[in-house]
């Protein structure tokens, strides 16, 4: 028997840096990576704006507690009122103490706070920064800040959640006169969704069940909902009930508009729901009138659940649905959305039967195991450069 010494695979310490622990696709991706790779990496979290006192925030905190993953909080300040600088200072203090191998940035708030942290000291030679681009439109309101941040993040490893998101980064940099990043610096890794196709269930008689679930912000098309719903109800005599889940800056105005609306369909408001993907089969249609999306995790979950998805025909979402998807509408086109919604409401079962064949291939394409494997290679590639060759354990052959 011959023993061949082999190197033990490095177990890198990855610190995820998110905006906060609350509703958001990027936060869910960071949590999913942590859960899938708990045995391969050591993890910690830096929540730039802290932990939200919401059902989703508490649920995320509990998921990390069960994995013994420490969470460090950044700043209580708004990013526009000193939070970027204060969060950056706090991050620099945590990095000096914790010393992760990889700092993984998720979205513009962490990007900005990390860039600000470089004002308070340089990264140690053992730290590598990985940045995931989660949207097709970056720095939509902060062009000047974004230009400054982009200059300080030029040496980071870039991962995009879609080809459209990667192009969105290039487009912003081009618009700001910044150099084009080389092709090998950016890769595309689709987000994984931990959901499984379910056996078809016979729909119970009753009104069609319509769901909107997202942050209540302009990006998600929240301001278009009253007009879409009112017009759809006018186009059909079929009954429907509407559920609107989420929080955000437009929630109060949406509640006021729906309260004075002539809509004959009953509307129920609710907070974000943890694990919503497992409940999507309870609805007859998911409505996503977004103005822009990096990928759209809710859309992926709806397709896996076999629930019809009415969505904007935009970059990012086109990479979720199959070619020729019949339920896409031009962004901000209220009439087009209303006609599609009325069509589904009139015959929910027929649209469910057409959606069902999309379930299994969508689950395979957006497998969380596939996402986790891709990120593990990225994490280990850096760790292997930092760890000298060692005998490790012996393997018998």
Image: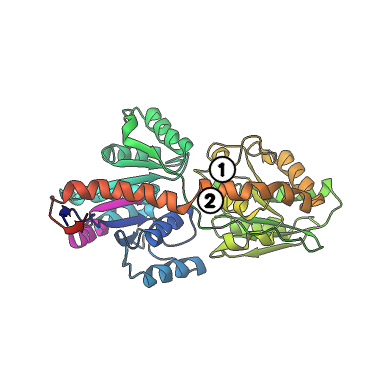
Asked if the magenta segment contains residue 119, the reply would be no
Q: Residue furthest front?
A: 1
**What residue sits 25% from the left and 57% below the top?**
11
Task: List x then y, in percent, for residue 164.
Answer: 48, 36
Find numbered disc 1 in the image and state the secondary structure of the residue it sits on. loop
- Residue 181, placed above or below residue 302: above
Task: List x then y, in percent, for residue 30.
Answer: 40, 56
Callout 1 crowding tier (Cα within 10 Å): few <14, some 14–19, many ≥20? many
Q: Quadrant of the N terminus?
A: bottom left
Q: Which mark is residue 320?
A: 1
Q: Earlier in the sequence, mark 2 or mark 1?
A: 2
Task: List x then y, in percent, for residue 146.
Answer: 36, 40
Mark 2 and mark 1: Cα distance apart in space? 9 Å
Q: Is residue 85 left or right of residue 54?
A: left
Q: Is residue 397 left or right of residue 364?
A: left
Q: Which residues fall within the magenta stretch?
A: 90-105
- Kindly indicate whether the residue at mark 1 contacts the one at mark 2 (C-beta within 8 angstroms): no
Find numbered disc 2 in the image and state the secondary structure of the residue it sits on. helix
Callout 2 crowding tier (Cα within 10 Å): few <14, some 14–19, many ≥20? many
Between residue 391 and residue 374, name the one nearer to us: 391
Q: Which residue is mark 2?
A: 297
Question: Is residue 186 something that shows in the picture?
Answer: yes
Displayed quadrant of residue 209:
bottom right
Between residue 351 and residue 235, name the one nearer to us: 351
């Amino acid at each position: 028997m011959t023993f061949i010494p082999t190197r033990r695979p490095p177990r890198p310490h990855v610190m995820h840096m998110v905006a906060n622990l609350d509703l958001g696709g990027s936060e869910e991706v960071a949590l999913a990576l942590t859960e899938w790779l708990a045995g391969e990496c050591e993890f910690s979290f830096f929540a730039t704006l802290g932990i939200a006192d919401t059902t989703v925030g508490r649920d995320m905190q509990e998921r990390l507690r069960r994995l013994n993953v420490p969470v460090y909080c950044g700043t209580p300040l708004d990013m526009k009122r000193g939070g970027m600088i204060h969060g950056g200072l706090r991050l620099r203090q945590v990095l000096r103490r914790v010393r992760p191998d990889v700092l993984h940035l998720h979205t513009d708030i962490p990007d900005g706070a990390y860039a600000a942290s470089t004002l308070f000291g340089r990264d140690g030679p053992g730290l590598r920064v990985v940045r995931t681009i989660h949207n097709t439109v970056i720095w939509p309101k902060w062009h000047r800040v974004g230009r400054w941040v982009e200059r300080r993040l030029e040496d980071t490893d870039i991962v995009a959640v879609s080809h459209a998101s990667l192009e969105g980064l290039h487009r912003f940099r081009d618009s700001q006169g910044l150099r084009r990043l080389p092709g090998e610096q950016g890769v595309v890794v689709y987000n994984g969704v931990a959901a499984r196709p379910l056996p078809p269930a016979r729909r119970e008689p009753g009104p069609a069940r319509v769901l909107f679930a997202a942050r209540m912000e302009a990006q998600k098309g929240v301001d278009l909902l009253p007009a879409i719903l009112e017009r759809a109800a006018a186009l059909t005599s079929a009954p429907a009930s509407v559920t609107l889940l989420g929080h955000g800056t437009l929630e109060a105005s949406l509640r006021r508009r729906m309260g004075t609306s002539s809509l004959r369909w009953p509307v129920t408001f609710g907070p974000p729901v943890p694990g919503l993907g497992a409940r999507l089969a309870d609805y007859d249609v998911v409505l996503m009138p977004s103005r822009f999306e990096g990928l759209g995790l809710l859309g992926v979950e709806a397709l896996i659940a076999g629930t019809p998805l009415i969505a904007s025909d935009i970059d990012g979402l086109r990479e979720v649905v199959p070619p020729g998807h019949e339920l896409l509408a031009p962004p901000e086109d209220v009439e087009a959305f209303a006609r599609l919604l009325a069509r589904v409401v009139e015959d929910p079962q027929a649209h469910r039967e057409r959606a069902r064949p999309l379930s299994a291939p969508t689950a395979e394409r957006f497998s969380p195991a596939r996402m986790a494997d891709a990120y593990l290679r990225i994490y280990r590639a850096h760790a292997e450069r930092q760890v000298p060759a060692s005998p490790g354990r012996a393997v018998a052959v």
